[in-house]
């Protein structure tokens, strides 16, 4: 498919502006894919190098339309409009480019509050194919990757897990399904936790009385939160959760209650290593005395567990290896290394 180029500056908005505020990968990719399919030229901006500190992690992204509307963040909100303006220039020329901001940047009027520096890759999307494949994978709750080669200006879809970072002269952006919470418990406490979790970006699935958990619900991006005051009602749900790869399993109750819970689970065949997966008392602080405090405690605990889980994957998975940006990062972006056929594609 031919590259769409923003041919006339007259069609641009007076200045770039956010279409809506979100740093969720699904929102950003969907915004880009929808815009392309409606006839817009679109650039995908990715944070590919950090010098010193930065407000966002490697792999943070924005999508920018040819009319200046954008979605996403690559910094703390202080540079996004300037980044979008540079992305529009890339769209007008139809050529990928890099942008350095902060430390080591030629733009002295743009200073990052953290005092560090960042490098951004601005890729002119050729079509929405690779993005749609990522979105479809995430909808199936499967991990996926986009592999970007700056020299060839090529963006490829790949299935499977990964970590965002450089592989030689290619940058890999890894995506995981949206975090999901399977929630069961008394209406007051479960309702409060659901509200906080939803605004924190979790897909919340409430488990009603008498329902069981199936293993296809319990993937590695799912947390199980049990807020009962009745161990007997918990046990079937804990049996399923402990047999799964759920990244978090938490249950309400005091340490004395948890000791009784563990004894009941031992009688059901669970060993000590398995029982150690249960976070009880649930939350980051003990003895929350009202539903709203409990909700904050639980969701904060999930966020901490998620970060630790991802760090553990990076440190222990021999298949996940990433390097820092190439020493000669400018060479990676050299268009002289581009192939004659520049495409967005899919790797099976």
Image: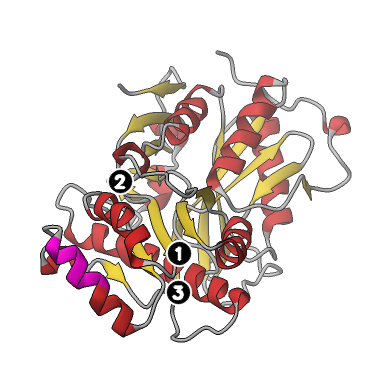
Mark 3 burial class by Cα count in 10 Å: few <14, some 14-19, many 20+? few
- Quadrant in which residue 309 is drawn: bottom left
- Quadrant in which residue 91 is drawn: top right
Residue 192 seen in the current view: yes
Residue 248 seen in the current view: no
On screen, residue 150 above or below 118:
above
Which residue shows up at 50% across the image and 68% down it?
A: 299
* Circles 1 and 3: CB atoms closer than 8 Å: yes
Mark 1 → mark 2, Cα distance in angstroms? 19 Å
Percent from the top left, x then y, of residue 180? 46, 50
On screen, residue 340 above or below 315:
above
For label 2, the residue is 162
Classify mark 2: helix, strand or loop.
loop
Residue 52 - label: 3
User: What segment is highlighted magenta in the picture?
Assistant: 261-267
Percent from the top left, x then y, of residue 2? 58, 14
For label 1, the residue is 50
Left-right relation of 84 to 185: right
Classify mark 3: helix, strand or loop.
loop
């Amino acid at each position: 498919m031919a590259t769409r180029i923003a041919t006339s500056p007259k069609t641009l908005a007076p200045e770039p502006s956010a279409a809506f505020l979100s740093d969720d990968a699904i929102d950003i990719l969907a915004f880009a894919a929808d815009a392309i399919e409606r006839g817009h030229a679109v650039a995908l901006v990715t944070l590919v190098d950090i010098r010193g500190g930065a407000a966002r992690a490697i792999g943070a992204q924005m999508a920018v339309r040819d009319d200046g509307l954008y979605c996403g963040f690559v910094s703390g909100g202080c540079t996004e409009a300037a980044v979008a303006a540079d992305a529009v220039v890339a769209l007008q020329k139809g050529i990928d480019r890099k942008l350095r901001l902060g430390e080591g940047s030629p733009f002295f009027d743009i200073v990052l509050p953290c005092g560090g520096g960042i490098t951004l890759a601005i890729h002119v999307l050729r079509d929405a194919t690779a993005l749609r494949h990522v979105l479809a994978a995430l909808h199936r709750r499967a991990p996926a990757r986009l592999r970007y080669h700056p020299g060839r200006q090529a963006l490829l879809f790949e299935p499977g897990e990964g970590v965002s970072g450089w592989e030689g002269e290619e940058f890999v952006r890894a995506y995981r399904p949206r975090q999901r919470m399977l929630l069961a418990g008394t209406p007051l406490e479960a309702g409060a936790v659901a509200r906080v979790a939803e605004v924190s970006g979790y897909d919340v699935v409430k488990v009603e009385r008498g329902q069981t958990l199936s293993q296809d619900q319990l993937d590695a991006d799912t947390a199980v939160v049990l807020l009962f005051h009745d161990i007997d009602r918990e046990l079937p749900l804990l049996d399923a959760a402990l047999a799964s790869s759920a990244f978090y399993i938490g249950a309400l109750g005091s340490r004395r209650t948890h000791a009784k819970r563990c004894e009941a689970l031992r009688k059901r065949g669970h060993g000590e290593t398995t029982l150690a997966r249960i976070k009880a008392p649930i939350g980051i602080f003990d003895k929350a005395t009202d539903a709203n405090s409990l909700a904050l405690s639980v969701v904060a605990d999930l966020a901490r567990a998620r970060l630790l889980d991802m760090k553990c994957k990076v440190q222990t998975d021999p298949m996940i290896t990433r390097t820092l940006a190439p020493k000669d990062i400018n060479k990676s972006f050299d268009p002289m290394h581009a192939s004659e056929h520049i495409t967005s594609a899919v790797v099976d």
